[in-house]
Amino acid sequence: MPSVFTRIVNGEIPCHKIAETEEFLAFLDVFPCAIGHTLVIPKQEVDYIFDLEDTLYDGLMLFAKQVAKAVESAIPCQRIGIAVIGLEVPHAHVHLIPMNSMADMNFNNKLQVSQDELAKTAAMIRKYI
């Protein structure tokens, strides 16, 4: 069964897209830790990030860096935190989270954000891609 992220890649589930290449996709987390919380994934479904082929892993990190710079430009914050947890969805992914304090990286405190607000946030970030 395809992961929820593969279903997003395939267009079966909508997302608030930030950036896309042939190999990677970045989109807003619908249950964000902070406004601008972005997920960066390889389009190829691989469960564990350290099982990615080296070139795909390197490409994912370079793509994440580009996306992080755009998020940082669009969302007022001190820096962009990065986390790879990998237990909640069996598809390698990187969390990019705008931070002003360590509390912003708390995955137990999810914000309630409307679809309209997510769309506006995605549009702001895309301006910097």
Image (tube, rainbow, N blue to C red):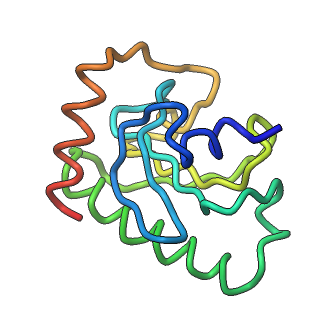
Name the image quarter holding residue 4: top right
- Residue 111 appears at what percent x and percent y? 44, 18
Determine whether, in the image, residue 5 is placed left or right of residue 53: left
Looking at the figure, which quarter contains the C terminus? bottom left
| Residue at image point 49% right, 53% down | 81
Looking at the figure, which quarter contains the N terminus? top right
- Residue 125 appears at what percent x and percent y? 23, 50
Name the image quarter holding residue 114: top left
Which residue is situated farthest in the bottom direction here? 55
Determine whether, in the image, residue 104 is placed left or right of residue 71: right
- The residue nearer to you, when weighing 84 against 46, is 46
- Residue 22 appears at what percent x and percent y? 48, 71
| Residue at image point 44% right, 45% down | 38
Asked if 2 appears above or below 33 in the picture, the reply is: below
Asked if 88 appears above or below 65 in the picture, the reply is: above
- Residue 31 appears at what percent x and percent y? 51, 24
- The residue nearer to you, when weighing 36 against 120, is 120
